Image (cartoon, coloured by chain):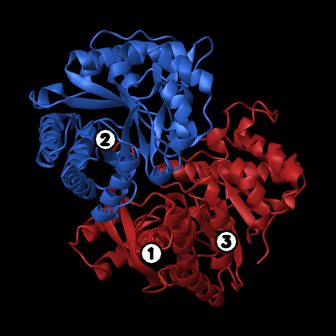
Amino acid sequence: MYEAYIVGLFPREDGLVIEWKRYEQDPGHEPAFRNALASSLDKVVKLQLDAGLSYVHDPLIDWHDLFRPFTHLDGVELGPITRYYETNTFYKKPIFRGEPTYPDGFIERFVHAERLPPNHIRISTLPGPYTFCRLAEFGGGVDPVDVVSKILSGAIGDLLGLGYGFVNLAEPELVYKEPDDSLVKECYGRLRAFKDAIRLQLFFGDASRVLDLLESLPIYGYSIDAQFTDVSLLDCPKKHLTLGVIDGQNTLMEDLDQLKAKIAEFAEGCPYSSLGLSNNVDLDFLPYEVAVEKVKLLGELYRRVAG
Amino acid sequence: MSLPILPTQEIGSFRKPDYLLKEWGRYLRGEIGYEELKPSIERASKETVSLLEDAGLDIVWDGEMHRWEMYHYPVEHIDGIEFVGRVRVFDNRYFLKGRVVSKPKLKKNYHLDEFLFVKSVSNRPVKIPITGPYTLADWSFNEYYTLKWRRLEGDPRKIRFHAKREFTLDLASEVINPILKELSKHGVFRIQIDEPAATTHPSEMPIFVEAFNEAVKGVEATITTHICYSDYEILLPYMDRLNTVQFALEFANRDTRSRGVSDDARKGYSLLKGLSELGVDREIGLGVVDVHTDFIEPVELIADRIRYALKYLPPERLFVNPDCGLRTRSREVGYKKLKNMVEAVKLVRKEYGFE
């Protein structure tokens, strides 16, 4: 049995970018901006439904970067513009000056539960704790694992309370470099309460090198980046696996016949009760129109492999 | 052309005057053609050259008035790369990104006319900044070469590497090299190859070096390079392999605003020690003002940064410049920063007896 879904931040359509810029220059433009945002959110939700995907991902088109919501917590500041791995996209580094507390319901301000259809399983993405610890900056006396796990526990708990089926945790750091196994285990040990609702998204690196570590973590499953991990050489994991086969870093459209054959070959040697199909990295790295086509392509791939 | 010790230079871009921004907007929306845009470009180009000369720079350019920005401008003039849509750089800032759909081919030498114009309106040596092949490739979606290499390779990592290498080398030999050779014939003083993407992918550093050297092969003009907001530790081992006389680098953005020449005060310049220890023998274009803040660096602070650099580099290999192009600052702020930079150089020249 297959499932298909998108993960990560979705790009903004040009119209929304323009309305946002007008709003930045003129606060009186806020109503027009809010309307444009709502309309864009609805389009991305409809796109997923029309593509026949298994779950609806919160579009997160109003997040400037993966960490931005958490910079609104007391005690966290916006730091310098920093390159996001090997991309030409930059994030603003969160700087923890103290140990912020996570107010109940905090993440609700940044997701769009009210715009997601009630009869579909909804999902969302948050930064993974290990990546968060590595990419943020922490002032003296702040224990990164402690503070990040408290914040993420609050956010994941809130999302589940809002009816989100599971949370995709973006963890590029875990595969981009040789990970610190004990730190990774400590991070996920703190999130154990949510183990059935956590899936990791591993991108910008080869996941086959860390399969043992992944299998030891209290998580439901993980996705691999097929641009970095040779799927044909991947061992059979015990946890739920999602193949990130739709490339969010190249406008080139995937050859569905080739992909279908590759997936079938993998599934044959590795029988699953459920195998996920997804994008490898956030579609935010693509222009909006191309990202739309990639979602449609994912839907088509899903139909073909699911028969 | 002889230069004083500690020559001062700009890096490239400077804020366009409002009237030109307005005209560029009309041009990009297709409301006017290039011929209608041109008079405003030339007016702004002339004004900017005068402004930089008035600030006292020894080597000038026109702030890239002829270009919308450093990626858009070349891509407009290269067959085989087409614009595909806007992609986020950060926050709500986007750039129009291209995709390569066939082997790149130069439509026309897009730098010749602007160079001849700037040369005609300037009284100082002119340095022309040019976006390098690696950055052009890295900032484009690689469709054509990926498709080609998918037929030859199975491993996605090898496909990516080979596709990038071939794309970058084609840009170097088919696009950049002919431009540089033609500029050389027209007596350009210096050509600065801008490669802000150079260290983005550490595993692709050999591609960057190979393409850079291919781009400048057989070019008689003096070649310099500018690399900013990058991990210079990645660049260090490759510096000696690049056929360039100068590395103009960004330092001030990493530095403190404290006075003095201690390592703590000048922590943004720690790379200089490494350069000295490794025996890198190229000129260094020392970034002494931060282009991402309106803070006008005082003359004494800039002088301290230069004094610190002189602890590690001989004066004849030291050039002084802003971290990067000043397009993100207002013209007024940009001018004040450059003016203070020039004053600081004068101060240091006098202090060290370089005059």
- Numbered mark located on residue B210 in the image: 3
Give the residue at x 27% y 41%.
Answer: A25
Rendered image quadrant of residue A115: top left
The residue identified by callout 2 is A276
Name the residue located 20 percent from the left edge and 36 percent from the top edge: A55
In the rendered structure, which amino acid carries the disc numbered 1?
Lys
Percent of width and height locating residue B5: 82, 62
| Side of B315 where A79 appears, left or right | left
Residue A98 image label: none
Above/below status of B267 relative to A261: above
Disc 3 residue type?
A: Glu
Question: Quarter-wise, where is residue B36 in the image?
Answer: bottom left
- Which numbered disc, 1 or 3, marks the residue closer to the eye? 1
Q: What chain is colored red?
A: B
The chain shown in blue is which?
A
Would you say A238 lies left or right of B247 here?
A: left
x then y, percent, for residue B260: 79, 33
**Are the numbered discs 2 and 3 placed on the same chain, yes or no?**
no
Q: Identify which residue, A37 or A127, lies in the foreground.
A: A127
Q: How far apart, in angstroms, are the residues tagged by discs 1 and 3? A: 21 Å
Asked whether, in this view, residue A176 is left or right of residue B287, the answer is left
Say which mark, if any, is on residue B148.
1
Chain identifier of the residue bearing label 3 in the image: B
> Split into 4 quadrants, where in the image is the C terminus of chain B?
bottom right
> Which of the two discs, 1 and 2, sits closer to the camera?
2
Residue at the bottom extreme of this rendering? B185
